[in-house]
Image (tube, rainbow, N blue to C red):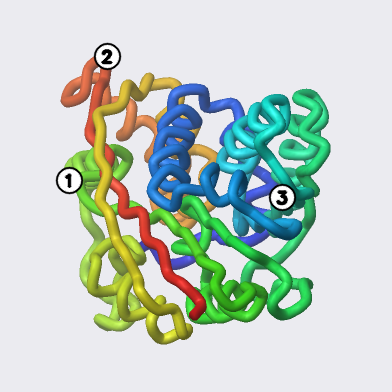
């Protein structure tokens, strides 16, 4: 990844409204949340529970996974298929994301969702207080993923599981950005190898196994899902202009120059309707 990215609560707050308003990108993220939750079998877990369940969404952004899961639980409750009380903590370290999630949950009367500002690298939760934890495209971006994994492991009860999703090639945004970078003049190589931009975190099965195992997780399963997605140019431009993980690139090249280059790339190489592939891993590790 590009050095100098503003991967902070303030950085994500600044782009939260644009992120939440991205209809097509949001639909893509929700689809992967659906695949992830179905892989875990969470609705079956809820229906078979014999004691109150506490669920935790870590780095949940605008509540994509939490709201979808909340709807599923509410439907089961309406059918009298939830035998125990449920608490779903929808957390993020960016206050604006938590506020967006709170408003969405209130609008849909998902009263069991508790929006909460939490840093996934230092969760202010008791040890062994959570039955299942999720992080859909959240934990893989943590500056210190080892802390993120260890904190998730700490708060899980024995027998609980952590579910994460992470991107792996081919990934639509990276395809467009890669094509864009080829169009731009590249500066002389002045950075030592250790400071070169790194690849996408947790984008290989080996990396996922290694990092989850190091935190103590066992019986790790990894499943790949992929599909093709309609990505309107306007949403992709907004993504480039507001995503804090691209702030280093915007600062280095200049926002106007980067936007113009991306627009040219989209127009000439990815004309609308622009449909591109995106692939992700769904990984589940258990605390035995």
> How far, Cα to Cα, is label 2 from label 3?
39 Å
Crowding at mark 2 (Cα within 10 Å: few <14, some 14-19, many 20+): few
Q: Does residue 265 appear anywhere in the picture?
A: no
Q: Please report contact status of discs 1 and 2: CB closer than 8 Å, yes or no.
A: no
Around disc 1, counting alpha carbons within 10 Å, would you say few (fewer than 14), some (14 to 19), or many (20 or more)?
Answer: few
- Identify the residue at image location x=36%, y=54%: 282
The structure residue drawn at horizontal position 23% and vertical position 73%, both measured from the top left corner, is 206
Q: Is residue 124 left or right of residue 175?
A: right
- Give the structural element (helix, strand or loop) at label 3: strand
Residue 215 drawn above or below residue 74: below
Near-viewer residue (52 or 192): 52
Foreground mark, 1 or 2, reads 2
Which quadrant holds residue 64?
Answer: top right
Closer to the camera in the image, 17 or 46:
46
x and y percent of residue 79 in the render? 67, 26
Please state, as top left, top right, bottom left or bottom right, where the N terminus lies in the image.
bottom left
Q: Label 3 near label 2: C-beta < 8 Å?
A: no
Callouts 3 and 1 close, C-beta under 8 Å: no
Pair 2/3: label in front: 3
Q: Nearer the viewer, residue 140 or 129?
A: 129
Label at residue 182: 1
Residue 272: mark: 2
Q: Is residue 168 left or right of residue 137?
A: left
Mark nearer the N terminus (1 vs 2): 1
């Amino acid at each position: 990844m590009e050095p100098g990215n503003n991967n902070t609560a303030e950085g994500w707050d600044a782009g939260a409204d644009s992120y939440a308003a991205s209809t097509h990108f949001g639909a893509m993220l929700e689809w992967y949340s659906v695949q992830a939750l179905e892989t875990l079998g969470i609705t079956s877990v809820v229906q078979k529970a014999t004691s109150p369940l506490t669920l935790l969404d870590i780095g949940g952004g605008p509540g994509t996974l939490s709201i979808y899961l909340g709807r599923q639980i509410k439907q089961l409750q309406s059918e009298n298929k939830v035998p125990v009380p449920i608490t779903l903590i929808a957390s993020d370290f960016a206050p604006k994301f938590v506020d967006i999630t709170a408003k969405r949950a209130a609008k849909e009367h998902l009263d069991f969702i508790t929006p909460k500002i939490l840093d996934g690298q230092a969760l202010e939760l008791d040890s062994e207080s959570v039955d299942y934890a999720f992080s859909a495209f959240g934990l893989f971006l943590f500056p210190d993923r080892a802390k993120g994994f260890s904190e998730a492991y700490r708060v899980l009860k024995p027998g609980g599981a952590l579910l994460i999703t992470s991107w792996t090639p081919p990934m639509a945004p990276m395809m467009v950005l890669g094509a864009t970078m080829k169009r731009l003049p590249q500066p002389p190589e002045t950075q030592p190898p250790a400071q070169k931009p790194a690849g996408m975190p947790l984008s290989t099965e080996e990396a996922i196994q290694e990092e989850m195992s190091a935190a103590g997780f066992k019986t790790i399963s990894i499943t790949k899902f992929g599909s093709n997605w309609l990505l309107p140019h306007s949403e992709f431009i907004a993504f480039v202009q507001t995503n804090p993980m691209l702030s280093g690139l915007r600062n280095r090249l200049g926002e106007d120059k980067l936007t113009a280059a991306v627009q040219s790339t989209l127009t000439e190489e990815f004309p609308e309707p622009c449909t591109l592939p995106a692939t992700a891993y769904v990984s589940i590790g258990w605390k035995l």
